[in-house]
Image (cartoon, rainbow, N blue to C red):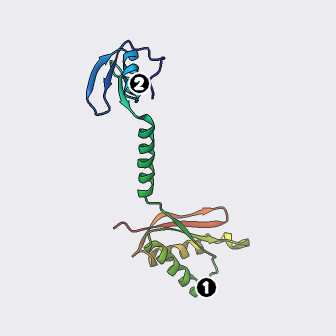
Amino acid sequence: MRINERVRAPEVRVIDSDGKQLGIMRPSAALQLAEEKNLDLVEVAPGAKPPVCRLMNFGKYQYEQAKRDKQARKAQKQVEVKEVRMRPKTGEHDTAVRLRQARKFLESGAKVKVRVRFRGREIRHPEVAKEILEDFAKELADVGEVEIRPNLEGRSLLMILAPLRT
């Protein structure tokens, strides 16, 4: 925060741009010193007694801070969630294809949302879909673990698998 005429403290502790303490002085004297050095007077610790101000190029500081934030965001790992959809009457071969897809997703580090969608009266037998999901989880136990157990969401049964931590 830049210091301006609204500072009510009678004195402030001033730190030079090199980190050297210049001592305690009146805010007007500190502002004059900042103008002479062509820098900004920035209040860094308003709660301290007396408040601490620093002489710095505030625009350059903001620019460098934005660069650091951008670099930190770039370093973060975004977890992808891929979805595999089936039905209670999905055939054996089709289920094997879905298993291969899910295995590939888990090995690449993505989470897998496995959804068994019900149509019509199929919803009366959720135990069939639960069994399908449990078999799915057993088959993928070597590359993934169940993060969210199968639960009913609307007209579909959902389970989320996460890659194993290494």
| Residue 127 sits in quarter | bottom right
Residue shown at the point (33%, 18%) measured from the top left: 50
Residue 45 position within the rendered picture, expressed as x and y whole percent measured from the top left = 37, 27
| Residue 93 falls left or right of residue 33 | right
Q: Amino acid at mark 2?
A: Glu
Foreground: 40 or 72? 40
Q: What residue occupies the far right of the structure in this picture? A: 120
Foreground: 10 or 108? 10
Dot 1 alpha-carbon crowd within 10 angstroms: few under 14, some 14 to 19, many 20 or more = few
Residue shown at the point (57%, 87%) measured from the top left: 93
Residue shown at the point (41%, 39%) measured from the top left: 61
| Residue 118 sits in quarter | bottom right
| Residue 91 falls left or right of residue 15 | right
In the image, which disc is placed on residue 127?
Answer: none
> Which residue lies under the disc numbered 2?
35
Residue shown at the point (40%, 15%) measured from the top left: 28
In the image, which disc is placed on residue 91?
Answer: 1
Q: What residue occupies the far top of the structure in this picture? A: 10
In the picture shown, does residue 126 fall above or below 46? below
State the CA–CA distance, disc 1 to disc 2. Answer: 78 Å
In the picture shown, does residue 80 fall above or below 66? below
In the picture shown, does residue 8 fall above or below 77? above
Residue 69 position within the rendered picture, expressed as x and y whole percent measured from the top left = 44, 48
Dot 2 alpha-carbon crowd within 10 angstroms: few under 14, some 14 to 19, many 20 or more = few
